Image (cartoon, helix red, strand yellow):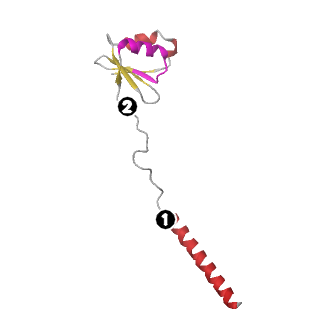
Amino acid sequence: MKNLFLISFSVLALYLSSCEQKKSTASTQESPKPEPGLVAKIDTTPKTITWEEMKVLIAKADYQTAGQSHDLMATLVYDNGTRLQAKQPKIDAIFEEMKKCEKCKDIIRMTE
């Protein structure tokens, strides 16, 4: 009976020792890093559309910001990062179209 007790105690001691080792190595290991390519990439390259298409989209007022550059390019930027651009017939044409749209009054405007 004494031998069985010693064997059981030895097994228990080995088990507890291995648990402590697993616990200490788990706390010192680094968190797993995500695999390359799993992070979503947002394409911010502007897609070019016609000025007539741009006017229709301006009236919808579902974009975050609108802007223009010196080269007459008008740009709409959406919440998801999508960028659409079109060549304006004249400077400030995008803002003139936005004035026609009641829903556009709170949209951010940018200019170069």
Q: Is residue 107 above or below residue 17?
A: above
Q: Amino acid at mark 1?
A: Thr
**Contact, mark 2 vs mark 1 (Cβ under 8 Å):** no
Verify whether residue 55 appears in magenta.
Answer: yes
Q: Nearer the viewer, residue 72 or 81?
A: 81
Q: Residues within 10 Å of mark 2 (few under 14, many from 20)?
A: few
Q: Is residue 98 left or right of residue 88?
A: right
Q: Amino acid at mark 2?
A: Thr
Question: What residue lies at 51% left-to-right and 12% top-to-bottom?
Answer: 102
Question: What residue lies at 44% left-to-right and 50% top-to-bottom?
Answer: 34
x%, y% of residue 111? 36, 20
Snapshot quadrant of residue 41: top left
| Residue under numbered circle 2 | 44
- Real-space CA distance between mark 2 and mark 1, rounded to the nearest whole angstrom: 39 Å
Q: How many marks?
A: 2
Question: What residue lies at 62% left-to-right and 83% top-to-bottom?
Answer: 10
Verify whether residue 1 appears in magenta.
Answer: no
Question: What residue lies at 36% left-to-right and 13% top-to-bottom?
Answer: 51
Q: Is residue 100 above or below residue 110?
A: above
Q: Nearer the viewer, residue 1 or 37?
A: 1
| Residue under numbered circle 1 | 28
Residue 20 in view: yes
Identify the mark at residue 38; answer none if there is no mark. none
The residue sitting at the bottom extreme is 2
x%, y% of residue 66? 41, 20
Q: Nearer the viewer, residue 64 or 11?
A: 11
Residue 92 in view: no
- Residue range (magenta): 50-66
